[in-house]
Image (cartoon, grey):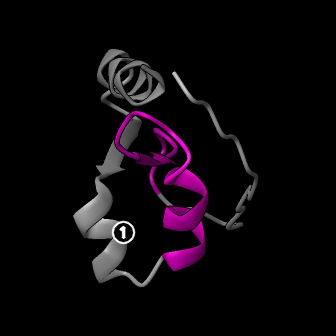
Amino acid sequence: ALADEASNIASMFSDVMTATILDADQCKELKMGSYLGVAAASANPPRFIHLCYRPPNGSVKVKLAIVGKGLTFD
């Protein structure tokens, strides 16, 4: 599944990357109702993936967020 692949990628680059995978209960606590509504159409439980990259040289001069939507029903 996509969440497993995200975790694997973060593990391969653990010096600069982390992965946080939220399950349905965690998404509900964060009031992610719209996301959970769409996810209800899947036969599989929802997983929300947050990948975080931290540069190897420490300080971050610019914060960059890439927001997108990727739905998989696998």
From this view, report whether residue 39 is shown above or below residue 15.
below
**Towards the viewer: 4 or 65:** 4
Instruction: In the displayed orientation, state which residue is furthest to the left.
Output: 25
Number of other residues with Cα within 10 Å of mark 1, as a class: few under 14, some 14 to 19, many 20 or more:
some
Task: Name the residue located 52 percent from the left edge and 52 percent from the top edge.
Answer: 39
What span is colored magenta in the figure? 33-58
Q: Position of residue 50 (x, y in %)?
A: 46, 51
**Towards the viewer: 2 or 6:** 2
The image quadrant that residue 38 belongs to is bottom right
From this view, report whether residue 49 is shown above or below residue 72.
below
Q: Is residue 61 shown in magenta? A: no
> How many numbered marks, from 0 up?
1
Q: Quick one: quadrant of the N terminus? A: top left
Tag 1 residue: 27
Task: Name the residue located 51 percent from the left edge and 21 percent from the top edge.
Answer: 74
**Towards the viewer: 38 or 70:** 38
From this view, report whether residue 30 is shown above or below residue 4.
below
Task: Name the residue located 38 percent from the left edge and 34 percent from the top edge.
Answer: 44
Q: Is residue 56 shown in magenta? A: yes
Looking at the picture, which amino acid does disc 1 mark? Cys
Task: Name the residue located 45 percent from the left edge and 53 percent from the top edge.
Answer: 58
Q: Circle 1 sits in a helix, a strand or a loop, which is it?
A: helix
Q: Is residue 21 left or right of residue 32?
A: left
Q: Position of residue 31 (x, y in %)?
A: 42, 84
